[in-house]
Amino acid sequence: MAGRFENSQPAAPGVSLMTRAYTSSKNHHDRKLALSFGAIVLLLMLALFSLASHLFIQLYEKKEDRLSSMLATIFADSIAKVSFSGKYHTRLFVEEIQDRIPALAFISVENKEGKIMAHSRSGENNTYLQGRESTRLRDLSLNHNTIVSADRICDGQVIKEVVSPYRSTLDNELMGVVRIGIKMDKVHKEQRKTIIRLIILIIILTLIAIGGILLLSRHFGDAHRILATQLRGILAHAPLLITITNQDGRLLDCSKQCDELFGSLPDRRTLKQYLEGHLSPPDILRLSQANDAIFTTGQAVELELEIELHGHKRIWHVSKFAIAHNDHGRPNLICTFVHDITERKQSEKNATEAKDQWEQTFDAIADIITIHTPDMRIVRANQAAGRMFQVAPEALIGRFCYEVFCEASAPCSGCPELRSRHDQRHHQAIIHHQKLGKSFEVASFPFIDNGRLSGFVHIAKDITKSLMLEEQLRQSQKLEAIGTLAGGIAHDFNNILTPILGYAEMALTDIDPGSPLAQELQQICAAAGRAKDLVQQILGFSRRGPQDEKTFHPHVVGKEVLKLLRSSLPSTIEFKTDIDDNCGTILADSTQFHQIIMNLCTNAYHAMEKTGGILGLGLSRVIIDKDDHKVASSELIPGDYIMLSVSDTGCGMDRRTLERIFEPYFTTKIAGKGTGLGLSVVHGIVKSYGGQIGVYSEPGKGTTFRVYLPRTADQPILDEVTAGFRLPSGQGRILVVDDEQTITAMLRKILEGLGYQATVTNDSREALSLIEAQPSFFDLLITDMTMPYLTGIELAQKAMALNTELPIILCTGFSELINQEQAYAIGIQAYLSKPILIRELALTLHRLLTKDKNLNLSHSDQSRIMQRFYTPIIWQPSS
């Protein structure tokens, strides 16, 4: 391989061809360069000379014209003045001028008819002008009143003839023309001399240029030989595969990479022949087409080929371009550079795959991910961001993050990105988007490049549902705590109410019903009833008490709520009521109806808490037909309804709030003032009864809620059950067990008053011992549910095991362990809720001991008996 590039070694045939090509090209280049440069310089000189001569002659002619015009004007003015003295003086003046200016060939003064009035040659005086050209110049000057000139030959000399009009000095009348002839031979002779000198100078400069070109060509030839030597050195040491081919495709020279790849290269083979067997036929065709394109257009060509070498496929990047041209300017030598880009292609493929995987991962993440510049401008956003803000991700690019996430014109306080920009550390915060109504957990991760902040990764996770679930969990925990508390309150409070109500009822039986004391005792009974219903209300709110649907008059409940509100709300709230006592009845749980009114009124109060206002409460009967558009929703079935309306003159609500007021846990109140459950519970209760709730509100104009509940034609059965009712008496031995001594003492007195023999105990173990001693002695067992040692259920089960015929009444203030259905299921015959009324107890005892099925009242009927003494008060904490 070295023999190709060292002069001391015989050259390979291929290299000889290349060397001869270099030598021939060098000699031809020297001659061609010298001749070409000489011709170019000569042509440039001649062109420059021609241009200069043309410009010089034009400039000189213009100068001549200006001088001739000036002379003609001066002579015309002078002759006009002299002609006033007569022809004699005019002719003397003309002859004198001719004598003084030898360059003048003649001076002639002519009238308008062409008659010569004065001439520098006296023989021409009084003759007429001869010659067509002279006549034309005179007429042209007279007609246009201007100076005209022309060159003509006169007596073998070149004369410049100038004709100028002249006028009379008396009346400025046009008298004729003044004609002067200027000799131009000497001027033209000087011009020819100047041109000859310039031509000689150009020839000398051209010869000097040709000599310089020959010297330069020798220098360039040496440089060419040096370049050829350098080329051979490059081919010997280049790490690339380089080939030089002629127009036939024959390989003239190549770099050492050819030997390393293909081994020893035979002479006079084409590059195509070398590559056959390594390239596919389509790639060989592409290579041939590339060569043809270079020889045709002279343009460089680049292409990629897949070649198989030593059993491995490689990817080549081939660059082909012309490096020499023939006399016609067509390429005759092509140089080919080959780069092995297999590793680069693999790296690009890996990078592309990694980029695709990154983009797929970036867009697949459900969290909102955006990339920001240091000034918080978005430069990249994933698909989740586009979906959240309902735009294409590209639409977010270029916007500030606080414009998108906070709808603000400046970064919001507490923004984690501000803190990350300050200390270049990770920060996070919770940000609420007002327009979307969503909360995001936003995390900011800074990009640090060489110790400098270059941007941020901004991750926003939609935690709206999580926060809602957390709030629901907190509220459920609160409700659970309330429920636990309610159960304890119900048990203890009902135990307290039991003796109060019992002794009051017994006192009523001992006095005159019309006495003032009887009325006071009835108030005690009514208050005790309200207290019991209050406990039931608490249990209902905490979902621990049964919901009892019955027919009742809603106006009674409405008035009770109104009494409670008047005593509890401040005087800044004015009440406006429109309650129709004849609106009818509804079938519902009165406790839940009370809850509906109380909740709506409490919300109305909160809307006017700071400013005061008017709280309106109305109840009326309405009939809805299919054409009525005043209903709250099209879901309302046409029919007979009772409408409850609650209004306020408070702050009102906007459209966005109205759309969400019935959502669970949605509240506009500050923390600690609302759970977000009130209106959702009201909505659920109303829908469960087949009703509808509607709301109308405007900001600053107050709010009105309208509740429609189906009206029923049924009447309350309370009076039917209790009218003319007398307490039934009886006989039998009854065992009473309760851990409260006041209750057992009261029950003993009641039972004995009804004719029964009562045995009481405050210890469930003692009661069991009494039954075990004489299983058939007692006719009936009355037991409390919650007691130390043995619960009421445990005692009842043990007692029934000893005496299967023993009737058992289970009494409870409240218990989560058992309800009425479960008690009946295990064999207990009666289930009474504290406080126990005398009438309720008397009926139950009579039913169990006499087997009177006509007195087999349901739990609902038992509860209604209590209502003879009071109007129920229903209370529900506001939400």
Image (cartoon, helix red, strand yellow):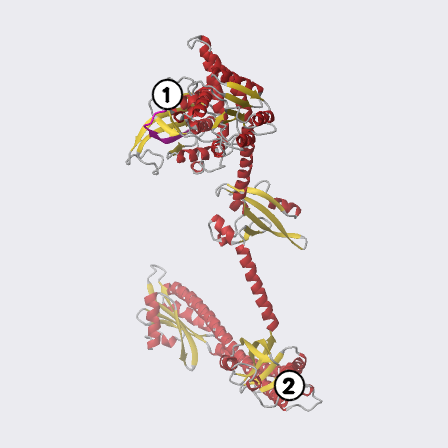
Identify the magenta region: 702-720
Picture coordinates of residue 99, whole percent (x, y): 46, 73
**At label 2, which amino acid type do we have?**
Gly
- In this picture, is 221 found above or below 694? below
Q: In which quarter of the image is residue 243?
A: bottom right
Q: In this view, does 734 lie to the left or right of 343?
A: left
Which residue is disc 2 drawn over?
263
Q: Point out the tag, 1 or 2, that comes first from the N-terminus.
A: 2
In front of the other: 541 or 187:
541
Picture coordinates of residue 716, whole percent (x, y): 36, 24
| Mark pair 1, 2: CA separation | 122 Å
* Residue at x 60%, y 75% (from the top left corner): 339
Picture coordinates of residue 501, whole percent (x, y): 49, 18
Are there few (<14), some (14-19), or many (20+) residues within 10 Å of tag 2? Answer: few
Q: Is residue 741 left or right of residue 114?
A: right
Q: Is residue 501 magenta?
A: no
Which is more foreground, mark 1 or mark 2? 1
Are there few (<14), some (14-19), or many (20+) residues within 10 Å of tag 1? Answer: some
Q: Is residue 246 left or right of residue 603?
A: right
In front of the other: 24 or 540:
540
- In this picture, is 763 found above or below 166? above
- Where the N terminus falls, by quadrant? bottom right
Q: What element carries label 2?
A: loop
Q: What element carries label 1?
A: helix
- Is residue 459 in sight in this rendering? yes
The circle drawn on residue 719 is 1
Q: In this view, does 775 lie to the left or right of 453?
A: left
